[in-house]
Amino acid sequence: MNRGLLIGGLAGMLLSMVPWWTAFRNLDNLDLARTLAARESARRGPADRLADAPWRLAAGSAGAAQAAVARRVRAAAKANGVLVETLKAAEPIGPGIARIELSMSGPEKAVLTLGDAVERGGRGVRWENWELAAVPGGVRLMGTVAIAWR
């Protein structure tokens, strides 16, 4: 009985090692696959995943994108009685993403409505950062707007 138990125990231990052996072999294959994928990715270079995104503003250049957003902001500000204090081009973030610095003041409701309309009214336009401050007679909204264009 002891001899059968010993043989069965040893056989069980040997059989339990088989999955570990295949697991280590599969880990080696995974490492090789990751290495090959990294080499291929490095060979191709970085991909612009946003190049053909439909939500990007259709413009021929960063300047054209900035001008289109500036026209829209000025028209909306004029219609809502908001004073645009600053509206100038800023340093682009990268290829396909332009920026403008924007500062406007007026009655609180009108300024907040216009600030919201900057994002909601245009494709690929988002506030990168903003600050709202109280001024005599209303509020001032200052910040940087990022424009994704294609």
Image: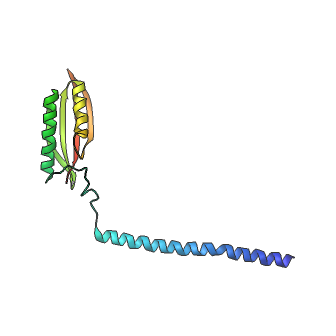
Between 4 and 91, which is closer to the camera in this rendering? 4
What percent of the width, then of the height, locates residue 78?
13, 30
**Residue 75: % across, % down:** 13, 35
Going by the picture, which residue comes out furthest to the front? 54
Count of numbered circles on the image = 0
Q: Residue at x 28, y 67 (%)?
A: 45
Q: Which quarter of the image is occupied by the N terminus?
A: bottom right
- Which quadrant of the structure image shows residue 136? top left
Q: Is residue 47 left or right of residue 105?
A: right
Q: Is residue 82 visible?
A: no
Indicate the position of residue 138 as horizontal and vertical percent values: 22, 23
Quadrant that contains the C terminus: bottom left
Outermost residue, right side: 1
Q: Position of residue 95 (x, y in %)?
A: 21, 56
Q: Residue at x 23, y 36 (%)?
A: 117
Which image quadrant is residue 22 in? bottom right
In the picture shown, does residue 135 fall above or below 16? Answer: above
Colouring method of the image: rainbow
The residue shown at (15%, 51%) is 59
Q: Is residue 49 visible?
A: yes
> From what the image shows, is residue 80 above or below residue 31?
above
